[in-house]
Structure formats: C-alpha cells, structure tokens
Image (tube, helix red, strand yellow):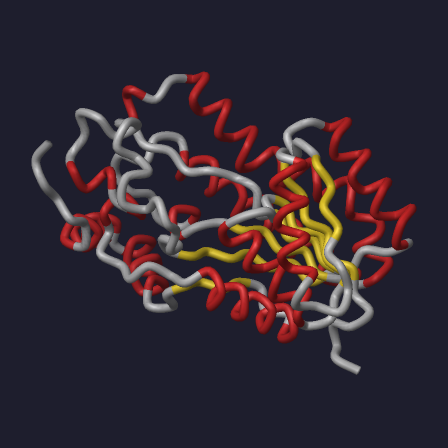
C-alpha cells in the first residue's frame, strides 16, 4: 500500500492555484483530501474535477479560515467524518503591493489576519489530531518569509510571521512526533500573473507589477512544487526553499546585509513608471 493511502489531508485555499495542485497530488497518492475555501461552488467544481482521476472522492468544505467559528466547525467536521487528520497544509493567503510608507496599519492588520492568523487558527484547531497521528503540518510561506523586497506592502511582514511561528512549532512539537514543514517558494505560475497587480501597483515602478515584485526568478509550476512538498513530507524535512539557490542570498543577507541588499537590487527588474 502507498504510504499516503490511509491518510486524511486538509488543504486550505484548496480550490485553485497551488492549493489545488497540492490537493490533487495527495489525492493521486491515495489520500482522502479535504479542500477548504470560502466559495462553496468553486470548491464543488474543483472536487468534481479531481474526482474523475482519483480513487477517493475529495471533499470540499466552505470555511473562512480567518474566522474562529468557521475553523472550529471545519475541524469538527473532519473529526466526525474521518476520525483522524494526518496532514494539514496551511496554504490560504494572498500577496499585496504598495510602498512601505503608504501601507497603513489597517493594511498590515488585514494581511496578517489572512496570511498569518489563519495559520494560527487552523494549527491550534488541528493540533490534537495531528499529534495523535504523528502527522505533518505544512505552512506555505514565501521567499519573502526569508528576505523582504521592495513594494510588497504588508506581504513580507505577514510571511516572516509565518516563518517564525513555524520555527516555534518545530522546536516545541518535533519531539512529540509532529513533522513541521515551512515551504518558501518563489513566484508561482498562474494565468493572471501578467496583470494581477496592475491596480495595486499603480504609481510604483513597473517591476512591482511583476510576480515576486520583479525579482528575476523563473516561475514555478504549481504541480512541480506540489510534488516537492509531498517528497519533503515523506523525508520529514524542516524546510523547503524553491529555488534552493535562494538560500545563498538569505545567508549573505544575514552575514552582510548591505551586500545582500545590493544583490537583491541587481536581481530586480527595475523600470520607471
């Protein structure tokens, strides 16, 4: 039997993009997948599409993971229906654009709620089941969780918080058998990548409209990253950085911040507005 054949996997933000690719990868490996998102119709459509290619029909549960009552209901349903949870992938979140001094307190609070506090809500609600199964907690960060960049508004702060929280969880819970994985990917391929930030980046350099804030990196196929995440779970890795070469920049920036800033500037596509 495949190692994932008896596992129950919850993926937040699971109806599209990277979340959908992760859900599909686990489903193809034989797991029972629960896809979570705010739009019930979108979830139903995604689950129906996946069901034609896998043995176990994925389940869609509509929930807003920034709301404690929704999160409690979500994991109560998982417990009642399946009696276990083996993998939680905290994938829900969004990016942003904006000059840092134009980013308001409310902007920071909103993105911290979506990108970070949703992870706290779900992790706390799922912790008992995950510890019982000695399972996997996967938190989707970003390269921006390790290295800030220009014109990303509140996004780096919210993802740095995810990285710090994941590190704390790993230090405190690894001895109890829980595998904790932080995933830090670069820009993900998506159909609207070319015009996604046109409005949010109005008045900013042209680079701010590009995926990753214009940093010169090849976009990552979500299916490829999903496969790497599954392998990282099998190996119980603590972190997955894609592309791996970004670790060199992180190390340089820690040791020589000015040099790290210079390298990042050189790697950014700069154009005047």
Is residue 82 shown left or right of residue 227? right
Residue farthest toward the bottom in the current orientation of the protein: 1
Which sits in the foreground, 101 or 68?
A: 68
> Relative to 32, is 156 above or below?
above
Q: Position of residue 272 (x, y in %)?
A: 7, 35
> Relative to 135, is 16 above or below?
above
| Residue 96: quarter of image | top left
Picture residue at 16% right of the left edge, 38% below the top:
206
Q: Position of residue 78 (x, y in %)?
A: 83, 47
Q: Position of residue 175 (x, y in %)?
A: 75, 62
Quadrant where the image shows the C terminus = top left
Picture residue at 30% right of the left edge, 56% below the top:
255
* Residue 134 visible here: yes
Is residue 149 shown left or right of residue 22? left
Q: Position of residue 248 (x, y in %)?
A: 31, 65
Is residue 266 shown left or right of residue 102? left
């Amino acid at each position: 039997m495949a190692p994932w054949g008896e596992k129950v996997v919850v993926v937040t933000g699971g109806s599209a993009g990277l979340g959908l690719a992760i859900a599909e990868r686990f489903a193809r490996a034989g797991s029972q997948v629960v896809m979570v998102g705010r739009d019930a119709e979108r979830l139903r459509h995604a689950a129906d599409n996946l069901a034609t290619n896998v043995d176990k029909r994925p389940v869609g549960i509509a929930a807003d993971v920034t709301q404690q009552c929704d999160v409690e209901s979500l994991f109560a349903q998982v417990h009642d229906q399946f009696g276990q949870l083996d993998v939680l992938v905290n994938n829900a979140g969004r990016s942003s654009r904006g000059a840092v001094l134009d980013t308001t307190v409310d902007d920071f609070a909103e993105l911290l709620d979506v990108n970070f506090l949703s992870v706290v809500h779900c992790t706390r609600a799922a912790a008992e089941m995950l510890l019982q199964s000695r399972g996997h907690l996967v938190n989707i960060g970003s390269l921006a969780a390790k290295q800030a960049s220009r014109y990303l508004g509140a996004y780096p702060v919210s993802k740095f918080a995810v990285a710090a929280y994941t590190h704390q969880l790993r230090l405190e819970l690894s001895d109890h058998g829980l595998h904790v994985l932080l995933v830090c990917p670069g820009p993900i391929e998506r159909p609207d990548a070319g015009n996604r930030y046109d409005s949010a980046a109005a008045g900013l350099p042209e680079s701010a409209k590009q995926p990753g804030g214009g940093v010169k990196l090849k976009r990552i196929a979500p299916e490829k990253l999903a496969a790497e995440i599954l392998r990282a779970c099998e190996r119980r890795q603590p972190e997955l950085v894609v592309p791996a070469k970004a670790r060199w920049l992180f190390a340089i920036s820690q040791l020589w911040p000015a040099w790290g800033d210079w390298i990042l500037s050189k790697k950014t596509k700069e154009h005047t507005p």
